[in-house]
Amino acid sequence: MRVWVTIVLVIFATGLCAAGEVQQWPDSVWQPKYERALNHMTAHRLLVGYPDFSFRPLKVADRYEAAAVLSRMVWFLDLHLPEREWLPPDVPWNHWAADACFILTASRLYPSPKGVRFGGDRPLMRGEFALMAWNLVQVLQGQTPSKRLSDVGNPYANAAGKLSELGLLETYPDGGLHPEEPMRRWEICDVVYRLLMWNEEHGGPTLGGPVLYAPRPRNG
């Protein structure tokens, strides 16, 4: 597995798919939370910026970026990979996020069988990220996520609801979760930060301790 390549190359990743207007939180509400989460995530290299050192928090993320973030989470949390890794057919082997996609499929955070396109350049929907984040929560709880998306009923809305119940996904000002809306980079940052805080409360690695974001030797 060429995970070290992912960690190096993803720092230089460029390009985001622009999307339509998304309902925004007032600055006074989300900005302090975003800054706190951003400081922790970038310090631990779980989230990285662009070559110009900007983070572009209001940009809509794409699915490749979600794969990059979640692949780092797999290594940071030292999670078991229950599946044999495989690359979606539309992801070139030399793409900057190829190794992240390998990890995503092997960890079952992305529940899709072999041969299904990943669509990494597509704008990331809140429900899509919620599903992958909820699968991560299930792994942390000792459960194995479903192997196929079709095995889960109403997967995006259900995952968003479960994350909300745990306090990991914030609702919109109207009280809805809106899983169909595009997800901005600051929202990913906020969910990841909350998830790590939640995991720390349950005995997981602390953000203040040594950070192992590079792969460790594994048996087998």
Image (cartoon, rainbow, N blue to C red):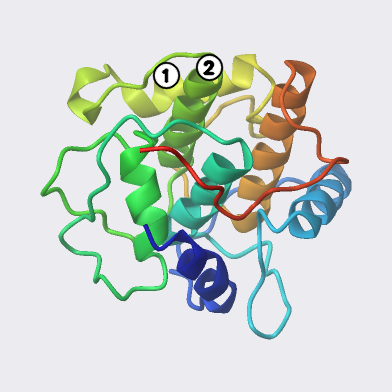
Q: Is residue 183 visible?
A: no
Q: Amino acid under label 1?
A: Asn
Residue at image coords 48%, 77%: 15
Between the C-alphas of marks 1 and 2, the distance is 6 Å
Residue at image coords 73%, 45%: 25
Above or below, 184 relative to 15: above
Quarter holding the C terminus?
A: top left
Query: 172 or 106, which is in the foreground?
Result: 106
Q: Is residue 48 visible?
A: yes
Quadrant position of residue 193 = top right
Give the residue pinned by disc 1.
158
Give the residue pinned by disc 2.
162
Is the residue under label 2 in contact with that under label 1 (CB below 8 Å)? yes
Query: 217 or 40, which is in the foreground?
Result: 217
Q: Residues within 10 Å of mark 1 (few under 14, many from 20)?
A: some
The mark found on residue 75 in the picture is none
Q: Residue 38, percent across and down?
A: 78, 54
Quadrant position of residue 202 = top right
Q: Residue 76, percent across and down?
A: 63, 43
Q: Amino acid under label 2?
A: Lys
Residue at image coords 10%, 49%: 115
Q: Residue 181, percent across and down?
A: 47, 44
Q: Farthest bottom residue?
A: 52
